[in-house]
Amino acid sequence: MTLVNASLLVAGVIAAAIPILIHLLFRRRRPPMPWAAMDILLAAFRKQQRRLRLEQILLLAARCLLFMLLGFALARPILAQTGLFAGDGRTVIVVLDDGAASHVRTDALDPRTSGFERLKSEAVTLVRGLAQGDSVGLVLASRPSRALIAPPTTDREAVARAIEALEPTSTATDLAAALAVAAQVTEKEGVADAERSVVVLSEFRVGSLDPTGPKPTPWPTEQGAPKLLARTPVDDDVSNVAVTSIEAQRSVDDDSVTVVVRLERAGGTSAQQIVRVSLEGDGIAPVPARQVRFDAGQASARAEFVVRAAGDAQRSVSGSLVARVEDDRMPLDDARYATFDARGVTRIGIVARRTFAGSGELEQVPASRWLQRALEPVAQPGVEVVDIEPVSVDARTLREIDALWVPRPETLPPEAWRELRAFTDRGGLLVLMPSADIDAQRWVERFQAAYVSGSGLAWQIGLDAPALETPLAFATEQPQSPIYASISAELTELLRPIEVDRRVVVTNAAPADVVLALADGTPFLLLGEPGGERRSNGLVAFVASAPELAWTNLPVKPFMVPFAQELVRQGLLQIGRSDRIAVGDRPLAPRDATEAVAPNGARVAFDPTTRVAQSPFSVAGVWTILDVAARPVGGIAANIDTLATRVTPQAKDTVTTWLAGAAQPTFIESGSFVTSMTKTDTGPGIGFWILCAVAVIAVVELLMARYFSHAAIARGTASDPGIGATALIAGSAPRRGGAA
Amino acid sequence: MRAEEYLAPETLAQLGSFELRAKMIVEGVMSGMHRSPYQGLAVEFAEHRPYVKGDPVRHIDWKVFGRSDKLYLKRYVQETNLDVVVLVDSSASMRYGTLGVKSGWGGTIASQKAAAWTKFDHATATAAAIAYMCLQQRDRVGVGTFAEDLRTAIKRSNARDQWRVIVQSLSVEPVEGKANLPKVAEQVLAKVTNRALIFILSDFLMPVAQLRDALARFRHRHHDVILLQILDRQELRFDLADPAPFDGLEGEGRVNVDPPAIRAAYLAALREHLEAIEKMTRGIGFDYQRMDSHESTGPVLAGLLARRDAISRRSRTG
């Protein structure tokens, strides 16, 4: 048995003391009454004492029971699953889609017309329409999916109020996880025996349910398994333009930054559309908005902005950026945020053993020297190149380094690889390459252990680099990588004279990681983000050929300088660009960060051990990073996952197929949800019967009270006025007195 | 104003003078007895005289007519050798009364304390009236009050100031203690050696056996006894509404009682007690009259006298 309002039962039990209190108080207030016929009164009292005590106990018990039962009835007890009383019974788990896709509106400017408001309204109507005794649970489908009300409760009104108070989140919908949570709730003790239904309230747009994404876990299929009910998917094709990325690329010529804003259009792609894109930023000079035109059938577009520092033209650009498009029916992805930092000194470390031998011939110049010359051909105010002995690679040294080149990886002591991983995790750029001094690249195993095993990188780097019979040129079509985007116009010409005589073959690399490719399709330069079990803010690059003349003529070609410098500059820009963090993520703390402050003032601390945010970033925008002294030391841009805001409707069959991964769904039209789910009460619940008992006890108490006390006065005095002054013995007369 | 109205306890309570109160009662009694006002309490056959036209037929002695074929009327004379003793209960239970009176009205000590017309007030007023009547017909009257013992005993006399002595004695008597009638009977019998008519005014809230014991002693000495049982109306009706602790006036203790709950049992017990007293009294051959202290004394006394007159006539004719 469960109680809807257990507090009322407690109140009833407390109220049961009222008759006792009244009894005690009344007893004490009466003044004593002198009485002459005391012997007769005592005789009557003793004769009636047991009966009177019994009457009083009965009366008191009836009154106390009245209060307790009243409290019990008002507490709305439910005898779940007993079958004793009609109206007790089912368990309904409502899975409510409160993810980003539910922000889609009917009216672009009115948030009350959002899909979530519709779903919420349907959920409330559904919950309130259930029969007395039905219990309701609530699971929210936005990531991370969670059971908001579990175990299910019979207080349907409380559930309805909880639903009404909900706001949609900005994170992606994870229906697969939500269905798994709902299944767990239905399997809990006390629920599993009931008739169970899981109702999925979602519009099933692509943002909520990606048919190519993870499939739901199959539910049990035995007798009495939960039923899966779902709202019929919507079919309105909403036109939406989303800002999908914002990238800052540092100019080669000056301190300006080129910002590329990418747009994606969904729905209404058959029509031509002009979208106004604006860019604002903290610390940059104002830039005029751009008009971007989508031709018929065009789904993606881009807009470029060249930004400079506000006020002082000589100052380097840094700060935050936000790109916006005009309001449309999906407001969540109309803006995108980014941060970048192109100011200050970039410290580049080159790990190499110091050599004192002269290197008169070009063939004997080691890679470290080539790199040093390429990175700092002339003294530049913003760049500082330092040599680091392999044995000096430790946390203290690496703390001051932004980018680290390791041309002789085999010279690193084994423990240095752990420091390198920590370096990239903190946000450093690590560039590795095969050693020109050895044939077998044994260091690869340590690299694999530090970066590949259990991480997001899947690169398989070859152990040897045999000399090629025919030197390899670069591929004529290079991958579209932002690293060399600023020189993309000259890139082909710059690569044309370069030949590669030896290189290490890297396999299993993701296409997105390939920055430069050779003519045989093998990668020359890879750039990837370590991930996996450990989170990382930095990047790892691998050059397949050592920059020495025995391996390639790159060091003596013009591309050598931009090759090294752009890799560092754009690589660090990418690391500093934090728009990769999605709302709902728990990002890794940047260097020196202890806490992040959201635009709305919310605060999230970083775990001092794991350096991961202790709770997800909940809102989009630039979060200010604070150090241990609560000083701002940077920012992290958190953006909406534009995959989660895709508003394209899906065919019912597609949704059916996907949901069938859990259980065969039954679709119900949104308008008929209530009538389909509402169970007609076939009889009153236990609360009704208890109230009937209360009424009966009240009547009995009334009769007893009248019979035992006050009513007896009226009855007694009316039928028996007492004893008069006349003789009681009829016809009796004294004989003549004794004196007669 | 009718005489009975003068005799209502409410009216009597307004009369500060005890004497006046008693006279009012007696006048009321007389007004209700048009025929032979001084006959009834103690009368005896005197002589025959010849019937003359106009005499009441009911006084003709039909036995003489049967023997001699002549009409004679029977004539009676008052007894002169019968003393009257009035005993008034002044135990604590007589202090009870619920008929409200003005404070400082000049009644007995008991009623002044209770600000009510108590049973003792009623008893003393009645006793004074009886004494007055008896003195009027030249009977010798003595009065005593009692509780555990015989507290005061006014010697029997028909002197002119006897009534005043009686009244003064009754008005100052304390009302307390517990009645012990057998003991009192012994004390009275020690003083009253000749045959007497004894009035006992009490609530008789005592064991019936005790009362029987006392009456038996009076019977043994050939005294005639009239019991006047005086009870308050509340005692007779017991129609109190609210629960309360009841305190016994004679030290019986205290008990919390819900009157409506035990009313029936109380009335039954009281009725049983009264019936037992009445039955026992009449069984012995004494007279018994119950009085409600809220009701007028005169009509009750008149009724008592009329009844005794009728009885004596039946016994003479019979």
Image: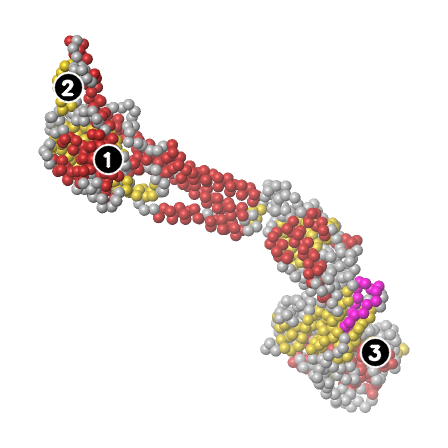
Query: What colouring method underlies this structural image?
Result: secondary structure
Q: Residues within 10 Å of mark 1 (few under 14, many from 20)?
A: many
Which residue is most to the front? B53
Mark 1 belongs to chain: B
Label 2 marks a residue whose chain is B
Query: Is residue A230 visible to the viewer in this orientation of the structure?
Result: no
Q: Disc 2 on helix, strand or loop? A: strand
Query: How far is the residue under mark 3 from the one under mark 1?
Result: 137 Å
State whether residue B248 is above or below residue A264: above
Q: Nearer the viewer, mark 3 or mark 1?
A: 1
List x then y, in percent, for residue A166: 64, 60
Farthest-out residue, right: A470
**Magenta segment, prevailing SS (helix, strand or loop):** strand
Amino acid at the residue labelled 3: Ser
Q: Residues within 10 Å of mark 2 (few under 14, many from 20)?
A: some
| Percent position of residue B220, x then y | 16, 25
Magenta span of residues: A261-277
Compared to A338, does A81 lie above or below?
above
Tag 1, which secondary structure?
Answer: loop
Q: Along the line of sight, which residue is nearer the eye, B10 or A143?
A: B10
Q: Residue at x 77, y 67 (%)?
A: A241
Which residue corresponds to mark 1?
A: B7
Give me the C-alpha separation between circle 3 and circle 2: 166 Å
Q: Is residue A253 visible?
A: yes
Mark 3–mark 1 CB contact (< 8 Å):
no
* Left or right: A199, with B167 as reference point: right
Q: Is residue A148 left or right of residue A31?
A: right
Q: Which mark is residue A488?
A: 3
Which mark, by number, is residue B75? 2
Determine if marks 3 and 2 fall on one subunit.
no
Closer to the camera: disc 3 or disc 2? 2
Residues at circles 1 and 2 in contact by the CB criterion of under 8 Å: no
